[in-house]
Amino acid sequence: DSGVTQTPKHLITATGQRVTLRCSPRSGDLSVYWYQQSLDQGLQFLIQYYNGEERAKGNILERFSAQQFPDLHSELNLSSLELGDSALYFCASSVGNPTDTQYFGPGTRLTVL
Amino acid sequence: DAKTTQPNSMESNEEEPVHLPCNHSTISGTDYIHWYRQLPSQGPEYVIHGLTSNVNNRMASLAIAEDRKSSTLILHRATLRDAAVYYCIPTNSGGSNYKLTFGKGTLLTVNP
């Protein structure tokens, strides 16, 4: 158990819909990262927040957005969903320094029908 | 980001040592070398990291070449639980880029 929790574990929805994935970091960690893992693209970095502020952005689509709240939990919002958005979405947390170990949650499996 | 090259797959027998190689010839002087692994149906987990010297922890050892252009993750006695995809990831300690860039990794199969 990494100490990072993600909800829900599974999500099935239809194209065009909007969903919210939630992540609670390990106690004491200030940074939250979101990654997407699909069969064709592998594990890809989406976005990072540090203590409530966006710190780094990766290949995140404009239809996707995220935020980190004062209690440090984070949400990833995916809208206008397409079939290709079906993937595993992982959240990770770390203290916040560049080379800190990132601790990953169990992931949310999103299926878009 | 520094590019890495790892074998697509490797096979080992239980209780035997495993050496997982990684080439990272474009690594910069301030890049650490991190290794993560992903067990089936789980999120990635940290294994070990180092900068210049060889490193040991309870999970594995990391041998870093003197020119830092390659490294080897060593599992001293493979168990069935070590079957996973292993990722070698250079991480920049000097910049503001905190992301982990995962390549395809090496799929390790452990035979009983």
Image (spheres, coloured by chain):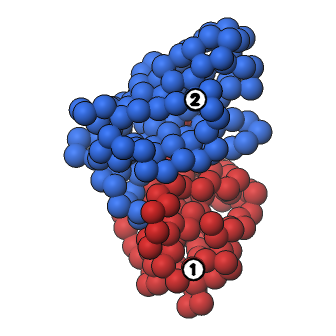
Q: Position of residue A58 (x, y in %)?
A: 59, 47
Classify residue B56 by image quadrant: bottom left
Determine the residue positioned at 63% across, 32% down. Answer: A62
Q: Nearer the viewer, residue A36 or A74?
A: A74
Q: Drawn colour of chain A?
A: blue
Badge 2 vs badge 1, beta-carbon distance below 8 Å: no
Determine the residue positioned at 77% across, 39% down. Answer: A40
Is disc 2 surrounded by few (<14), some (14 to 19) or many (20+) residues within 10 Å?
some
Tell me the kind of residue under disc 1. Ser
Tag 1 subunit: B
Determine the residue positioned at 36% across, 43% down. Answer: A53
Label 2 sits on a secondary structure element that is: strand
Mark 2 → mark 1, Cα distance in angstroms: 32 Å
Image quadrant where one finds the N terminus of chain A? top left
Image quadrant where one finds the C terminus of chain A? top right
Tag 2 subunit: A
Q: Is residue A48 above or below residue B108?
A: above
Residue corresponding to mark 1: B28
Q: Nearer the viewer, residue B59 or A78?
A: A78
Tell me the kind of residue under disc 2. Phe
Q: Position of residue A64 (x, y in %)?
A: 58, 29
Q: Is residue B41 above or below residue A47?
A: above
Residue corresponding to mark 2: A64
Q: Is residue B13 above or below residue B49?
A: above
Is disc 1 surrounded by few (<14), some (14 to 19) or many (20+) residues within 10 Å?
some
Q: Is residue A107 visible?
A: no
Q: Drawn colour of chain B?
A: red
Q: Nearer the viewer, residue B79 or A74?
A: A74
